[in-house]
Image (cartoon, helix red, strand yellow):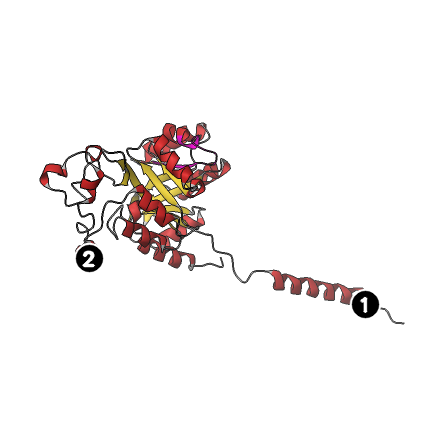
Amino acid sequence: MRRPCPSLLNKKYLLLVLLCLSIFQPLHAEAPRVFFQSHRGGVNEVPENTLVALRHSWQISGAVPEVDLRTTSDGTIVCIHDGTPERTTNAPEEFARTAIDKIPLATLRSWDAGSHFDGKYAGEKVPTLDEVIALLKEDPRRELYLDLKGVDLDQLVGIIKREKIEERIIFVHGSPLMCRKLQGLYPGARTMTWLSGDPEKIQQRFAELKENKFKGISQLQFHLQTKALTPEITYVFDAGYLQDAVAATRENNVDFQLRPFDFNAQSLRYLIDLGVYWYVSDDPKAFARSVKEALAINLDR
């Protein structure tokens, strides 16, 4: 019997290997999942810190809304950013500059918190934390950032544990030291803090946090200033520095987050390619649209 030529067998084997690789090789690279904090629920698109803002954010892919917490004079936790109601409600002159913690809930809730943004939102009220949590619990996939402006931690944690939403909350505070305390409130508690100011200040503070292995921090945000808008958007930090920041935070199980004040699909693709998958935006709908466009750019490269 005539035996097959060894070279012919090798060629057939090689073709079989190549065929298998072509079958199991993905048609294109898998796009990374991108998430972003919807600042105050989307401050540029809806009246901030309202229930309509939360609904707006939670219907956008990748968005996690953020609300600010303060406490009324009668001990109810509510969602409002400023220390007074002047900017975001139609509070009368006698109350406009009064501290939130000096105003009873019923009085605060008697004012409109939507028409300052647009008349079509007239009737929106400053929501209570209980109302916000009720919305959160309508969908088990929803998560929420809580920026602690003025609350009693024992009271807040009691509510979170009562509602069994520990894993769905991310605490926000400007102090890394406070973040350490917040992480100790219960097992698995998540925190976010941010670095802002000029690039040198951010780099200095980042180096200090890195030295301490980002203790107490689950997510670290940079305010990302724009260097130039034309001929394309560029940022004050170069690719090498941002890649090092991504690597350093990831090594310590910390999500690196950017807040680009200017963005488009091209600039976001650049940042995504550097490994940045968490962001912050005042314009969640517009941001999500740009992310979708960004992920479609040169996806196979």
Closer-to-camera residue (291/156)? 156
Name the residue that disc number 1 marks: 5
Which stretch did the figure color magenta?
182-194
Question: 227 or 204: which is nearer to us?
Answer: 204
Q: Callout 1, which amino acid?
A: Cys
Q: Is residue 41 above or below residue 100?
A: below
Which image quadrant for residue 90?
Answer: top left
Q: Residue furthest bottom?
A: 1
Q: Residue at x 54, y 63 (%)?
A: 27
Question: In the rendered view of the protein, which quadrant contains the N terminus?
Answer: bottom right
Residue at x-position 47% and y-position 36%: 188
Q: Which residue is pictured at 35% across the width and 47% down the height?
A: 134
Q: Nearer the viewer, mark 2 or mark 1?
A: 2
Q: Nearer the viewer, residue 246 or 78?
A: 78
The relative height of residue 67 versus residue 265 in the rendered view (above or below) is above
Could you say which disc has been placed on residue 45 in the image? none
Q: Position of residue 164 (x, y in %)?
A: 43, 41
**Measured from the top left, where is residue 135 in percent x and y?**
35, 49
